[in-house]
Image (tube, grey):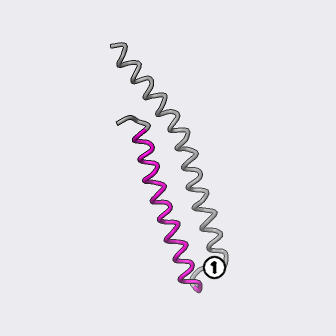
């Protein structure tokens, strides 16, 4: 399995976990309005959105690095 494929699979798994946490917190806020502050939904949305977006940004950079490493490994195989 190439490094790009492993990175994509890992990023998808992490994003799904973060989306699950976001879903849980959003539902918790809706079902327990007395236990959370009035701006709970906005704070959760901003925080989780920033976490997921930041992770995708880092994942894009890591994807480019993984693609470069895959190309280098393929070139090294053909040289030997």
Residues in magenta, as a range: 5-34
Residue in the foreground of this view, choosing between 27 and 39: 27
Image quadrant occupied by the C terminus: top left
Q: Residue furthest top?
A: 79
Residue 42 is situated, as x and y percent measured from the top left of the image, at: 65, 70
Residue at position x 55%, y 44% in the image: 58
Q: Which residue is mark 1?
A: 37
Please tell me how crowded label 1 is: few (under 14), some (14-19), or many (20+) other residues with Cα within 10 Å.
Answer: few
Residue at the far left in the pictured view: 80
* 33 to the left or right of 65: right
Give the main secondary structure of the magenta stretch.
helix
Residue 51 location in percent, x, y?
57, 56
Magenta run includes residue 56? no
Please check the rendered image and state whether residue 28 is part of the magenta-colored stretch, yes or no: yes
- Residue 78 quadrant: top left
- 40 or 77, nearer to the observer: 77
Residue 48 image offset from top left, x and y in percent: 57, 61
Residue at image position (39%, 24%) is 73
- The quadrant holding residue 38 is bottom right
Secondary structure of the residue carrying numbered label 1: loop
- Where 23 sits versus 64, above or below? below
Residue 53 point in image, percent of width and height: 59, 52
């Amino acid at each position: 399995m190439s490094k790009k494929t492993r990175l994509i699979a890992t990023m998808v798994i992490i994003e799904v976990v973060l989306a699950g946490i976001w879903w849980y917190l959003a539902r918790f806020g809706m079902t327990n309005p007395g236990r959370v502050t009035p701006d709970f939904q906005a704070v959760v949305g901003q925080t989780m959105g920033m976490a997921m977006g930041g992770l995708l940004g880092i994942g894009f950079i890591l994807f480019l690095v993984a693609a470069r490493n895959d190309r280098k490994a393929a070139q090294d195989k053909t040289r030997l």
